[in-house]
Amino acid sequence: MPKPEYRILDFEDQFSTIYGDTIEIPANTMFWRGYDPTYPTISSRPAYYGTEETANSYLIRKGHRLGMFTNTRKLELLDVRFLKALLKQLFESIQDTTDLTAHERELIMSTTAAFGLCSLGHQIRLLKYIFSKNLKNLQGLPELEKLYNPKAAFEAQGVRVAETVNDGYTMAFLKGLFKGVAHGFISPRMETPYHIEKKGFLNPEMIIFDPAASGIQLLDPSINLQNVPTLSIYELMFKGRYHIVSLDYKTLHSTFYMSYGGGSRQKYLHPLDEFDEYMDSDNKYIRKLYKDGYKIGLKMNSKRHIFSAEPPVPNTPINPNMFRGLELE
């Protein structure tokens, strides 16, 4: 039987947003993560994977190991920015919140705060509510408050906030919500002033909702990587069915794709790994959060159409008097 031809996924290769489709990661792609050999290396819990350098930066526990992994079959991943658009659309579609349980309302707030699905001001209020008993532990909150200007003509958008317990709860929800839709999501390096421990940036990475069911395997560390080629995420985005949209105005330029039809040297445990440790320690509160999050995700998955290959097109008429007297260049 011939040996697999591996390629290393280049997470540092910045890529423009893709809406309306998934990014396919072909089988036998290589990536890394740190793990605790005391527990199963590959489980059904959401886990992060990234570059060797990123994974090594999370190795702070005694006995933790750096693992080289691969996928035995292709992975269908959502661009995190498309994921955010889907979540906003889902939550905004819930017109009547009276039929939501307290857990469901809290989970929507947790997910909104984690991904910054709202304005910065609302995100700050949500974080203060969610962590009301532990505000002193939110070291990045003052940085968000510095950015918040209630008198601004256009309020800043919320940012990614990866707090351990809230993130674990949210990922369990996403696992249930996107079951049968995507294996996970992938993120480029993202600016987020909240994470002062990472100098205001989150490392590029992918989150796999269920590594065991997705065919993730640990590789032999003796594999020679000298001649293994890299695989650009940018390359993977071109499956022959994308429309490139460019927006240009004076000095502003933006590009994204739609479907037809540097970080700190300090080491911090990844939020999902820390959440895993709580789960493995048989913390009943954490286990209940995880179970509730997954259960609610499955419930919303079964009730609503989460994902469509055709992105929604705005069709709301505008007030013709709105631009009266304005000269557009």
Image (tube, rainbow, N blue to C red):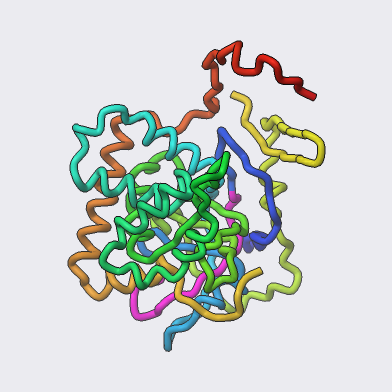
Q: Is residue 80 left or right of residue 109?
A: right
Nearest to the observer: residue 88 or residue 287: 88
Is residue 102 magenta-colored? no
Quarter occupied by residue 162: bottom left
Q: Is residue 295 left or right of residue 244?
A: left
Q: Quadrant of the C terminus?
A: top right
Nearest to the observer: residue 81 or residue 135: 135
List the single residue furthest toward the top: 320
Is residue 32 magenta-colored? yes
Q: Is residue 73 above or below residue 323?
A: below
Nearest to the observer: residue 209 or residue 116: 116
Q: Residue at x 76, y 40 (%)?
A: 253
Q: Residue at x 59, y 24 (%)?
A: 261
Where residue 43 sits in the image (x, y, percent)? 36, 63
Nearest to the observer: residue 312 or residue 128: 128
Where residue 52 sits in the image (x, y, percent)? 61, 72
Span highlighted in magenta in the image? 25-42
Residue 45 appears in the rendering: no
Q: Is residue 238 left or right of residue 310?
A: right
Where residue 39 sits in the image (x, y, percent)? 34, 75
Q: Is residue 126 above or below residue 318?
A: below
How many labels were placed on the picture? 0
Q: Quadrant of the N terminus?
A: bottom right
